[in-house]
Amino acid sequence: MADPIRVVIADDHPLFRDGLRTMLADHDGLECVGEAATGDEVLARVRDTRPDVVLMDLQMPGLDGIEATRRVVSAAPGTAVLALTMFDDDTSVNAALRAGARGYLLKGATQAELVRAIESVAGGQAILAEPIAERILDRLTRPAEEPATLFPQLTERERDVLRLVAAGAPNGRIGRELGISEKTVRNHVSNIVLKLQLVDRTQAALRAREAGLI
């Protein structure tokens, strides 16, 4: 028979610790070897028992779970920290993982999910609560947002004209490049100056260059 996974429970709520202790006792492969109600107590229990896994609440009096995680990982590299918390915001998740937590689970997890998470982190794997993992995956696979359009108040043709104005092209050349008459170019330039609330063509060219249109 393989040795049971040795677990320390770190949570400042006695009833929650009682529930976790009972759950661990119901599984032959898991053993509770210590409990802690504060971050400082966690460090003492880890030092005394050298557990395989610490179930770490993030909000505890004194030394919080994030800093306690950082110190446990530094002092006992063989001990895996599994954050077990009610906080599912990105700030808390990122802070726990940066501190060295190998897993992040929410307190609403089922017993089966918790046992699987303990076994996973004890075996060197990383694990995240399903909603958190889905959120991260969605963020990673989401198509990159299109860059904002410069001068959205202008039509596409007016932006083409402005780009050439900014490049220093005269009306005749702009007309030839875009296949329109010089009169139409002048009308576009007038509309551009009006829409951008500028004084003249020169100011329009300067604004376009500053914005990176060319």
Image (cartoon, rainbow, N blue to C red):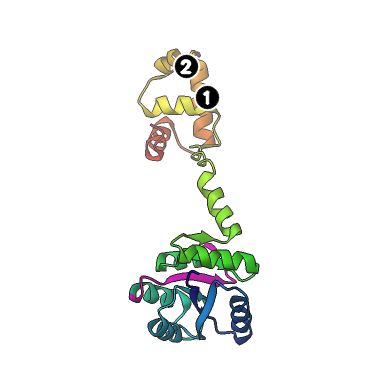
Residue type (three-letter) at the residue carrying disc 2: Leu
Q: Report crowding for label 1: few under 14, some 14 to 19, many 20 or more residues within 10 A (C-alpha).
A: few
Above or below: residue 207 compared with residue 27: above
Report whether 97 appears left or right of 107: left
Residue 206 numbered mark, or none: none
CA distance for labels 2 and 1: 9 Å
Q: Nearer the viewer, residue 103 or 157?
A: 103
In the picture of the structure, the residue carrying the numbered disc 2 is: 178
Residues shaded magenta: 75-90
Query: In the figure, residue 152 lies in which quadrant?
Result: top right
Q: Nearer the viewer, residue 153 or 56?
A: 56
The percent position of residue 17, horizontal first and vertical second, equals 59, 82
Above or below: residue 82 compared with residue 142: below
Q: Nearer the viewer, residue 212 or 167?
A: 212
Q: Report crowding for label 2: few under 14, some 14 to 19, many 20 or more residues within 10 A (C-alpha).
A: few
Asked whether disc 2 touches disc 1, contact meaning CB atoms under 8 Å apart, the reply is yes
Report the residue at 44% width, 33% height from top: 200
Query: In the figure, residue 213 lies in which quadrant?
Result: top left
Task: Report if residue 104 is visible in the image.
Answer: no
Report the residue at 54% width, 44% height from top: 142
Q: Nearer the viewer, residue 89 or 42?
A: 42
**Can residue 86 be found in the magenta stretch?**
yes
- List the single residue furthest toward the front: 1
Above or below: residue 29 compared with residue 190: below
In the picture of the structure, the residue carrying the numbered disc 1 is: 157
Residue type (three-letter) at the residue carrying disc 1: Arg
* Quadrant (top left, top right, bottom left, bottom right) of the C terminus: top left
- First in residue order: circle 2 vs circle 1: 1
Circle 1 SS class: helix
Report the residue at 42% width, 28% height from top: 163
